[in-house]
Image (cartoon, grey):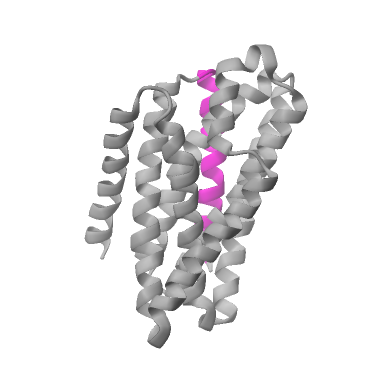
Amino acid sequence: MKLVLITALGVGGATLFGSIIGFLIGKVSHKFTDIILSFAAGVMLAAAVLGLILPSLEYGGKFALATTIAGIFVGAFCLNIIDKGVPHIHKFVATDNANSESSASVHKVLLFVLAIAIHNLPEGIAAGVGFGSGNTAEAFLIAGGIALQNIPEGIVIIGPMLAAGISPKKTFFCAFATGLVEVVGTLLGYFAVSISTAILPFALAFAGGTMLYIISDEMIPETHSHGAERGATYSLLAGFCLMLVSDVLLG
């Protein structure tokens, strides 16, 4: 339990860490954001496949394949429903980084912060569910991938909020709140599979599906929209291979 709590704080704290960097460096370029987010996408892709989907097949028993496929699609569908009510995170970031001085509004920015908070919940659940398999190395792989994604996310949310006229103190509090949601999600995911190990295969696949949805629907399209697609592609591959090497060494 202590490891889970430390991991939860680490995953949530990664957003806060990124936010501090955002305060220090101010506005960031599209190219920088695309390369960093692509690397994070590669890390998350490896974490989803190696740490969630393959273990789901391993623990699924007689109906492992059906359970895993169902979990992936249900996870993706849930994120799809969420996206109908909140803006696409990375698309919003790109727009506001380019036009924040002239068009940012408090309402729009707060909606953006809410979107990040909502998306952080299933990411946190994915980190927590990873511990349900009992494989600490895989759990850390998943959590590490999510944390790496949270750092650049934390960096890019600061500029739009400050440009909208939100005070630095309130901006920092919003960043803290989005990270806290991920801590809650991590604990929820862990306790859910701890209470009933029967749901573990589906929960693993569900978490994997949410991560695949975020990668495919938001991260990859956004990082290939500003002329840095070649670098973004290699950055994604580098992130994936890093996690592949980590999985082999930790395994």
Question: Which residue is rendered at x = 53% and y = 21% of the image?
Answer: 24
Viewer-side residue, 18 vs 157: 157
Is 230 located above or below residue 143 in the figure?
A: above
Magenta: main secondary structure equals: helix
Q: Is residue 134 left or right of residue 87?
A: left
- Residue drawn at point x = 69 percent, y = 41 percent: 114
Residue 131, placed above or below residue 223: below
The x and y percentages for residue 236 are 32, 40
Q: Is residue 129 left or right of residue 144?
A: right
Question: Which residue reaches farthest right?
Answer: 107
Q: Nearer the viewer, residue 162 or 223?
A: 223
Instruction: Tell me the magenta residue range.
Output: 2-27
Q: Position of residue 134 (x, y in %)?
A: 42, 74
Tell me what residue is drawn at x 46 percent, y 67 percent: 205
Q: Residue at x 53, y 69 (%)?
A: 1
Q: Is residue 20 magenta?
A: yes
Q: 161 or 220, which is in the foreground?
A: 220
9 displayed left or right of 49 = right
Residue 251 lies in the magenta stretch:
no
Res 48 visible = yes
- Position above or below: 172 against 119: above
Q: Is residue 5 visible?
A: no
- Report x, y in % for residue 168: 69, 23
